[in-house]
Image (tube, grey):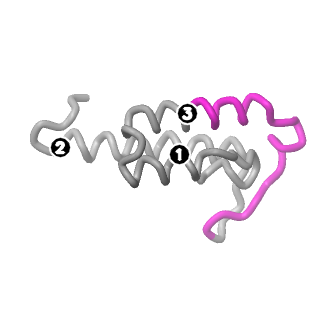
Amino acid sequence: AYVSPITGAPGVSRTVTQAERGQLPLPEALRQVEVIVSQRLRETTPEQRSTAFERSQTLRTLRKAIRRTLEHDWEHLVELSRRPGGPRL
């Protein structure tokens, strides 16, 4: 969602829906989304990489969107690591 305004990652929404419905195991869905988004990021043009877009009433660039994506995942990992039986950091 953070990078889609620039990359438009077709297939991600379908994969997420399948995972939410239990039709696709979550680890496999995450791998598929990572492949789709990584490919789209590699295919971005210099113009796309320098374009700013509005997200949540703030101006963002692709670089900021990627950074926020990584921060978001990290925040979830930290949250899960605090739960009993959660992953260890």
Name the dominant secondary structure of the magenta segment.
Answer: helix
Q: SS at mark 2?
A: loop
Quadrant of residue 24 within the rendered picture = top left
Marks 3, 1: nearer the viewer: 1
From this view, report whether residue 75 is shown above or below residue 34. below
Q: How many marks?
A: 3
- The residue at the point 69 percent across, 46 percent down is 10
| Residue hosting label 3 | 34
Q: In the rendered structure, which amino acid carries the disc numbered 3?
A: Glu
| Residue hosting label 1 | 15
- The residue at the point 50 percent across, 39 percent down is 70
Q: Which residues are magenta?
A: 34-56
Q: Is 71 or 9 nearer to us in this picture?
A: 9
Residue 20 position, x and y percent, is 40, 53
Measure the alpha-carbon separation of dots 3 and 2: 25 Å
The local crowd at label 1, few if under 14, some if 14 to 19, many if 20 or more residues have their Cα within 10 Å, is: some
| Residue hosting label 2 | 82
From this view, report whether residue 43 is shown above or below residue 18. above
Residue 47 left/right relative to 10? right
